[in-house]
Amino acid sequence: MIQSKKEQFRENLEKRHSAAKFFYFLLLICLLIGFFTLSVLIIDLAIEGGPWLRSQLFTNYHSRKPEEAGMKSAIFGSLINLGLTGLFSFPLGVGAAIYLEEYAPKNKLTSFINININNLAGVPSIVYGMLGLVVFGRMFGLFAPDSWLVQLLNLPVGKGALGGLQFNLFNIPWLEIRLPFGRTILAGGLTMTMLILPVVIIASREAIRSVPNSIRDAAYALGATKWQMISTQVLPIAFPGILTGIILSLSRAIGETAPLIIMGAFTYVPFLPESLWDQFTVMPIQIYNWITLPQAEYRVHLAAAGIIVLLAVLLSLNAIAVFLRKKFEIHWS
Amino acid sequence: MRLGKSTADIFDRRLSQATSLPGKPKWSKLKEKWIARILFFCGFFSVLVTIGIIISLFSEAVGFFLRPEVSIFKFFTGTTWRPLLKTVSPDNFGVLPLITGTLLIAVISALISVPIGLGSAIYLSEYSSDRLRSILKPILEILAGIPSVVYGYFALSFITPLIKTIFEIWLGLEVGFFNALSAAVVLGIMIIPTVASISEDAMRAVPRSLREAAYSLGATKFEAVSKVIVPAALSGITAAFILAISRAVGETMAVTIAAGATPQVTLNPLKSVQTMTSFIVQVSFGDAPAGSINGQSIFAVGATLFTMTFIMNVISDFVLNKFREVYE
């Protein structure tokens, strides 16, 4: 009896061990699928797009001849958009992070703001495009000829369905303001700011939280006020972490296509934007445009070349972020 | 005691001298107050963004439903979506084809990403050494960082031909050039890191003592993982599954490029479907003027999309927090 149970156990043990081995290989395959796809993608791009990675891509605009087509305006548009997004999201995101980490009392409003930020991070990016379209692009139609605001204040808006108000702030010639913002690069930057704001806030909070409390106590002990403590101690220490977070969020923004399409970025822009009120396009939109064209030169080759440029920008942003993190990392003992 | 009191006296006098310096303390107090206010505004701004999203989506959506050409009942129950037709009638505004198209792709992509993501997470959390993990994990995360337009390109140039070879040439089924399966596959790949990262966090939160207990009972690694660790981390894994579907529902460009633009109710992933997001993109490219029926229809669809993903995110959060096993 006992003997047979022992044998049974041995037999079972072998089965169990081979099941464990099989399972291990299954896991390895799972992990390898990801890596395999990544390498296939890179090889595919290199084969199709590599030979088309020429100087015309950077110096020309989109053209009817594939050999001459480039994405100059898209590259510039992406970079300007990136700059504007960084410019807007830095103060807003870091300010919110400082408030939530250093000032916010523990009450219902604070926990509501926290939940709200987490929810915003999960909103599909296309919804931000619709937000940008209504709030920045059209401004709820407040400046259309038949809106209540225009009639109430008797504003000198333009004719046409959309209307629009144009004036110079304080009569300074270069401080031109147009309301609504319309399909401009300014509206694009603001839309992207809304999109990455939750991520920027979450990353900055983490950086601020990692500053040990002893630093804060030391600053207070020397008689610093709260803002002096934050501006001279906490922020300089947390700055590399904040910057890393913002750059990583921007690298996500540069690949975003849908929000800007909805907001009203153009597909064909044969000039470089000169002011905030110019039309613009970005790299992913140009790539999408090429993918949808019927000729294989655009659909396959130019699109792949464009993607290589886009990924190169994205990778270098990530590399900068990793470099900053490694360089300024502080290990508190 | 006496000494203590006298030093405190001196300190008090010094302090009152210092604070009575003309002008300075009052100004700095005011400055502190204003800085706190500005920072509060920054913190509160995210609430304004949410309000902005809700107002902009729902005000236009309400405008759409108030039109005589559409009916809200037919919108949510109709199975025909032909908004670009010249003859505008309520029968042509049934959103169900878009919703089923979206869910078809989302569910398939979750069925792909959840097992693979979970498998990768188990490997990273239970099998790999810390050093190996620190190399493997960032590489895996690259998959999530690649822009979705790139996945769209990948779907058309690699996945669709592959699907055509397998299903059309080997199995003899009819496969459209644009098909839901191709989009679902690339979305699944795209979401793997999200699933892996959430499930891995959940598994790493399972205390060591549970593992040791399983091993001390003679469990093999497979048994410890499948009977102890994964059940203990089930809430996190469920949350990851829901979040994966929510991500896939909100994804735009890969779906727009790979799945085509044929709104139809079908369960056949080899056919072309249109999702909610790709409809919005299609109309936006067509330059629908503000206030027109098409310009407003995207907001009705967008509001539906926003509500769906919002509910899924809330459920996923709820599962994560409510059913989490708390270990001492």
Image: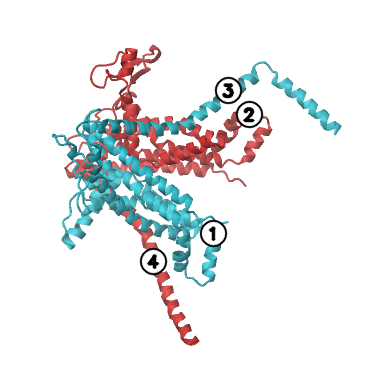
* Chain B colour in the picture: cyan
Most foreground residue, B123 or B210: B210
Pointer 2: what residue? Answer: A225
Pointer 4: what residue? Answer: A25
Q: Secondary structure at mark 4?
A: helix
Tell me the CA gap for discs 2 and 1. 42 Å
Q: Residue A298's x, y, as percent?
A: 20, 41
Disc 2: which chain?
A
Mark closer to the observer (1, 3): 1
Q: As shown in the figure, which amino acid type bears the numbered disc 3?
A: Lys
Q: Is A214 placed left or right of B137 in the picture?
A: right
Q: Secondary structure at mark 2?
A: loop
Circles 2, 4 touching at the beta carbon (< 8 Å): no
Q: Secondary structure at mark 1?
A: loop
Disc 4: which chain?
A
Crowd class of label 4 (few under 14; some 14 to 19; many from 20; radius 10 Å): few
Residue B130 appears in the rendering: yes
Q: As shown in the figure, which amino acid type bears the numbered disc 4?
A: Phe
Circles 4, 3 touching at the beta carbon (< 8 Å): no
Chain shown in red: A
Q: Residue B1's x, y, as percent?
A: 85, 34
Q: As shown in the figure, which amino acid type bears the numbered disc 1?
A: Pro
